[in-house]
Image (cartoon, coloured by chain):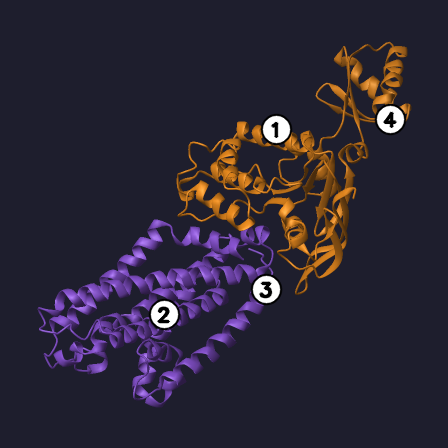
Amino acid sequence: MTTAISVQDLTKVYGDRSALSHATFDVPLGAVCGFVGPNGSGKTTTIRMLLGLITPTGGTGSVLGESISHPERYLSRVGAMIEGPAFYPALSGAENLRVLASLGGFPQERVEKLLEKVGLEDRGQSKFKTYSLGMKQRLGIAAALLPEPRLLVLDEPTNGLDPSGIQEVRNLIKDLVADGTSVFVSSHLLSELEMIAEHIVMLREGKVLFSGQTSDLLKSQSAILVAKPEFAVDLSEFVSLLAKAGFEATLDDGAANVVADEHLAATINRLAFEAGITLSALTPIRPTLEETFFEMTGE
Amino acid sequence: MLHVVNAELRKLRRPTLLYSTILVVVVLTGLFTSIVFLRVGSGRGEGRRGEAITIETLSQAQGLAFGFKLVAFFLGITALCVFASQTAQEYSLGTLRNLLVRQPARMKILAGKYVSMTIFAIALVLADAIVAVAVSYALAGHAKVSTAAWFTASALAIFGKTFINVLLATMAYGTLGMILGLLFRSPISAIATGVIWTLILENILSAVVSSTTKWLPGQNFTNISQGGSPEISYHWSLIISVIYLTGAFAVVAILFKRRDVAN
């Protein structure tokens, strides 16, 4: 088994609306895989099918080597938080976790440890209905960690968290992956995902746009070299020079944005030097995951 | 399934639910039993539907169980509300997805819920029985009711049979609540439908067209708790209730097993 999740042609149709259409992708073992897409692109539907909550209309899939048509064979090794935390408002955070621990047959001692792990040790005895959104989110993460999962599926885990909470979740995910856990995480915070996800699955309108290594996705996008002449008067001459040499360049805030990969920086520098233009800066800029996302999804 | 029962009991034993439900049962049982003993022999009909209760009736072996079975209908309505809300809230709170991720065998979830709520219903009936006996015994002297026949072997046998009948009726109402909870997936809709049907519509129907009484589920559940009546036999009520509830439960169980959990 080399994949934590593997789906082929996975499809879900509601009436005449296709929520997911022939999705095929793999999530490698022991890595963080980001799951991105605009609202309504089919992310939550996919996650629900992986967890046995929704029956696929077509296609096949496996989680931790077991078919998704038999979720009972793998769910004891999977932790999940789907579409925000849902708990019993009249029970305390600790009691909510105990309900799930009883249900899954997990040791009750884990409850206190997990509350501590997510920073809720002081509020564990308070009723869930008194929790802030960030605290509810933390409890959801604690619930997902109850089974000491080999695969953690998180749907928008940083919703409602403050910057330090987001950082804590990021570190928590890194620690889990270091211990061998695979993490499949859907998030709209693409800058966060870029920091932690080695793999990306991108959806739009129920179809997979990209599935593979994050670095491959980013490399597939055009890089920019920002070249800034020392003297502003040289800028228009420099841009003409670039155009003659076959580069696509645009003016932006006293600099030329040249569509070119990093390895062409020396060529551009030489062009400028030979024309008697000194460059005060020559900076390669890779498109971020967010920019790539907007580019690919047309959002 | 034991894991499910344990998890469900954790929810059911939360103080706000357990104590408030027991309190309602204690108050209603105390009130109804007191009224029977304080107004016994007044000739103005203290029993169900104008039935007159005399000191002689209460002094017999069945006197001990009289107050107890009088509250059976309210116990049933309480069970209906608890079963319906405990089932439907899993949908309205979105907690069903947590349960199914931890226990994907949906029939085990359903069976575990039913067993745990049965334990809850037994606790309610026990509370009813204890309060009814205590109040009856305490007020017997004041009402000049002799308790000599209450603790004989035949009285205890009658009491045991009444306990089973009240429990069966309570479970029948509770099962109806669970069916409505699974069907409507909203506690308010499930409880409102159940209460309006059994408390209002069935009574109107029964009063207006008396021939319908033997076919109405609520009337039959209550008849079980009373051990039968001259109009409808105990066995008829038992059989018709089992047919209704088994059929309806099978339908909602299939729905529960197959329906996508998309909320």
Task: Give the letter of the chain under mark 3.
Answer: B
What residue occupies the far front of the structure in this picture? B153
Q: Quadrant of the C terminus of chain B?
A: bottom right
**Nearer mark to the viewer, of 4 and 1:** 1
* Residue tagged 1: A171
The colour with which the image depicts chain A is: orange
* Residue tagged 2: B167
Residues at discs 1 and 2 in contact (Cβ within 8 Å): no
**Nearer mark to the viewer, of 3 and 1:** 3
Q: Which kind of residue does numbered mark 4 sit on?
A: Phe
Give the quarter of the image for residue A248: top right
Q: Quadrant of the N terminus of chain B?
A: bottom right
Task: Give the letter of the chain under mark 4.
Answer: A
* Residue tagged 3: B257
SS at mark 4 in the image: loop
Q: CA distance from mark 1 to mark 2?
A: 54 Å
Residue A247's disc is: 4
Q: Residues within 10 Å of mark 1 (few under 14, many from 20)?
A: few
Q: CA distance from mark 2 to mark 3?
A: 28 Å
**Nearer mark to the viewer, of 2 and 4:** 2
**Nearer mark to the viewer, of 1 and 2:** 2
Residue B50 seen in this snapshot: yes
Could you say which chain is coloured purple in the image?
B
Q: CA distance from mark 4 to mark 1?
A: 42 Å
Looking at the image, which residue is at 60% across and 45% down? A80
